[in-house]
Amino acid sequence: MSAKAPHKIAESSDHRLEPPTKVARHLVSTPHELAVTQFEQGLICAAEAFYRFYGVLLGREGRRHNLSGQDNVILQQIMAASRPLGVADIARFANRDDIANIQYSLKKLSRAGLIEKARNSSVRETSYLATDLAKAWTRDFLALRRELFTDPSAQILNFDEQLGISAKLLNVIAGFYDHGTRVMSGSEQTGEPLVDKPQRDHSQMGRLHNSGKRPPPVPSPPRSRGGRDAISAAHLPPPATLGLVPRGSGGEGTGGGRFDQGDGQNQVPQSSKKRLSSARK
């Protein structure tokens, strides 16, 4: 039997290698956007895997109390603090703004007997301390974390150095995301869009143009009894197009006449009236 030919990596029409992972094509138009999209896809998967892993490390008792990875992160934050922590402290450390979810996590941890209210808590904000039961759970958590993650990853060459570089890079990228969030919040408050969008023509001609229909024909002026075209005042263009100014404004328009006295609507220059009278004769 002949040996099978080795599998070749597919190449695109411009002889560039396909990306190693599938990404959302509508998010990519440049090589830099491809790199960013691949990183964000890995970031999403890593974040979900991290919280799922921290949830199962609490063991059977954690599942019995319906504790998640987010709850365990808050518990470890309280364990590491040198003083009682409140909701604002927890939100600031974890860069979170979902206060209601943090309060719900604290309620679950309190029902499980892992945290308790500090005695010096103020009326405005309650602070929490870790209990002895939380310390026992944390010892088991650290043993499992060491066995399943930290010890195996220590065998990877230059892994600590890569982790340090990744930590700095994540802080920089988090700064970009936070800055963009603040800019968008300011734009929504001021009502000024960041990206100019094309304005749609809402006039009658604009709607006809957008729909692809032909505009209606312009009606022709009525004919007089003598068979000669007589232009009525209703078919004259508005005075603004004739360059006329109202009486008393200090000048004459280019149409060759002044406005009559009145409310300024449907006024006809004197010279035009003379031409109309001669046309009727």
Image (cartoon, helix red, strand yellow):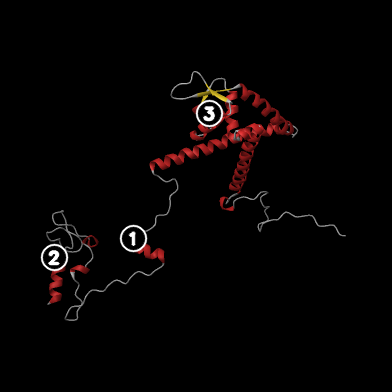
Question: Residue at position x 49%, y 28% from top?
Answer: 88
Q: Are marks 1 and 3 in contact (CB under 8 Å)?
A: no
Q: Position of residue 82 (x, y in %)?
A: 57, 20
Q: Position of residue 49 (x, y in %)?
A: 64, 39
* Secondary structure category for the residue under label 3: helix
Seen in the image, is 190 located left or right of residue 12?
A: left
Residue carrying label 2:
270
Asked whether 123 or 64 is in front, the reply is: 64
Residue carrying label 3:
90
- Name the image quarter holding the N terminus: bottom right
* Alpha-carbon span between mark 1 and mark 3: 54 Å
Residue 201: quarter of image? bottom left
Asked whether 151 or 260 is in front, the reply is: 151
Whether 55 is drawn above or below 10: the answer is above
Whether 217 is drawn above or below 83: the answer is below
Q: Earlier in the sequence, mark 1 or mark 2?
A: 1
* Secondary structure category for the residue under label 1: loop
Question: Residue at position x 74%, y 33% from top?
Answer: 152
Q: Nearest to the eye among marks 2 and 3: give it.
A: 3
Q: Position of residue 35 (x, y in %)?
A: 62, 45
Residue carrying label 1:
203
Question: Residue at position x 63%, y 37% from top?
Answer: 50
Going by the numbered disc 1, the residue's amino acid type is Ser
Q: Nearest to the eye among marks 1 and 3: give it.
A: 3
**Crowding at label 2, few (<14), some or many (≥20) Cα neighbours within 10 Å?**
some
Q: Earlier in the sequence, mark 2 or mark 3?
A: 3
Using the rendered image of the protein, determine whether residue 176 is visible from the camera's viewpoint: yes
* Secondary structure category for the residue under label 2: helix
Asked whether 269 or 261 is in front, the reply is: 261
**Crowding at label 3, few (<14), some or many (≥20) Cα neighbours within 10 Å?**
some
Going by the numbered disc 3, the residue's amino acid type is Ile
